[in-house]
Image (cartoon, helix red, strand yellow):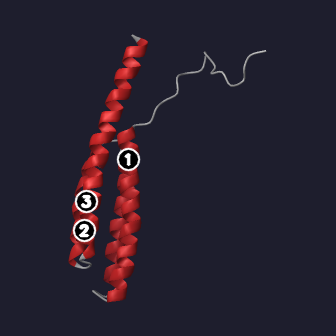
Amino acid sequence: MPDPAAPDPAAPPARTRSARRQFAATILVLEAFVVGFAALVAFGLRVAPPSVVWGVAGALALSLVLSSGLLRTAAGYVAGSVLQLAVLATGVAVPMMFVVGAIFAVLWIVALRLGGRIDRERAERVAAASG
């Protein structure tokens, strides 16, 4: 009787997900939550009319989430990078967002660099194993 835990040799190889894409998507979605919390702060401080606060925060949070879905293409990474600047710009209304935005910008850069390196090393390992 064959071992049920053993992989099926006839099955296609499992597709590995891009570490770069996973890291970047995580950063963008977490940033969307942070923008929501910053909107609560801006609303509480009455830095602008509520419709402006919620409109800007909602549009930015939605853009962050949508751009995480666009990471299949290079345009998604460009959009994510531009949105890092938009998150930094929210520091005009809530000054602490300059610090939080800078932290997320650094995390974004680290996610792109480290994720890319992991993906390259995976590809090299697969090439060495198959050839």
* Residue at horizontal 35 percent and vertical 75 percent from the top: 38
Q: Are marks 2 and 1 in contact (CB under 8 Å)?
A: no
Tag 2 secondary structure: helix
Circle 1 crowding by C-alpha within 10 Å: few under 14, some 14–19, many from 20: some
Q: Nearer the viewer, mark 3 or mark 1?
A: 1
> Is label 1 in a helix, a strand or a loop?
helix
Look at the image and tell me whether residue 59 can be seen.
yes
Question: What amino acid type is highlighted by mark number 1?
Answer: Phe
Q: Residues within 10 Å of mark 2 (few under 14, many from 20)?
A: few
Q: Which quarter of the picture shows residue 116?
A: top left
| Identity, as a three-letter code, of the amino acid under mark 3 | Gln
Residue at point 23%, 66% (across, down): 88
Is residue 87 in view?
no
Residue labelled with disc 3 = 84
Report the residue marked by disc 2.
99
Nearest the eye: 22 or 53: 22
Q: CA distance from mark 2 to mark 1?
A: 21 Å
The one of 72 and 90 positioned closer to us in this rendering: 90
Tag nearer the camera, 2 or 1: 2
Residue 70: x and y in percent read 36, 48
> Mark 1 — residue?
23
Q: Are marks 3 and 1 in contact (CB under 8 Å)?
A: no
**For this view, does 82 lie left or right of residue 61?**
left
In space, the residues marked 3 and 1 are separated at their CA atoms by: 15 Å
How far, Cα to Cα, is label 3 from label 2? 12 Å
Identified by mark 2, the residue type is Val
